[in-house]
Image (cartoon, rainbow, N blue to C red):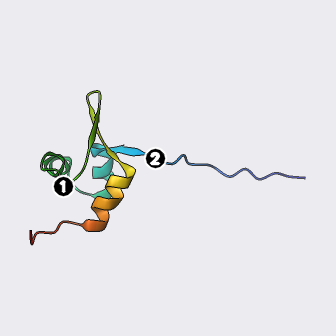
Amino acid sequence: MMTILKEVTPKRFSYGLDEIAVLTGLSTAFLRKLARDGTLKTKKFGARRMVMEADLQEFLKGGNDESK
């Protein structure tokens, strides 16, 4: 009997700003600005600033509300 193995991609829990820039097309400078003003929640791990997957999803759902 032949067993077919599926490639498993591990679930990501966090992303660097550079990775988010590639995935979304937003510039790293713009993402850093959003992180500084608190629009994009980040956590610092050593010297690296990371965005948790849940926070990225929440940010992408909300978009950028310019009316506030």
Q: Secondary structure at mark 1?
A: loop
Amino acid marked by disc 2: Arg
Tell which of 57 and 25 is nearer to you: 57
Image vertical order of residue 49 relative to residue 33, above or below: above
Question: Where's the C terminus, which quadrant?
Answer: bottom left
Q: Residue at x 9, y 72 (%)?
A: 67
Q: Which mark is residue 12?
A: 2
The location of residue 47, given as percent across then percent down, is 26, 28
The crowd level at tag 1 (other Cα within 10 Å; few <14, some 14-19, many 20+) is some
Image vertical order of residue 31 relative to residue 43, above or below: below
Determine whether label 2 and label 1 are within 8 Å by CB: no
The Cα–Cα distance between marks 2 and 1, rounded to whole angstroms, is 21 Å
Tell which of 24 and 66 is nearer to you: 66
Q: Which mark is residue 22?
A: none
Image vertical order of residue 24 relative to residue 13, above or below: below
Q: Secondary structure at mark 2?
A: loop
Q: Quick check: 29 left or right of 19?
A: left
Q: Quick check: 56 left or right of 4?
A: left
Q: Which mark is residue 39?
A: 1
Precedes in sequence: disc 2 or disc 1: 2
The location of residue 24, given as percent across then percent down, is 30, 58
Amino acid marked by disc 1: Thr
Q: Residue at x 18, y 47 (%)?
A: 35
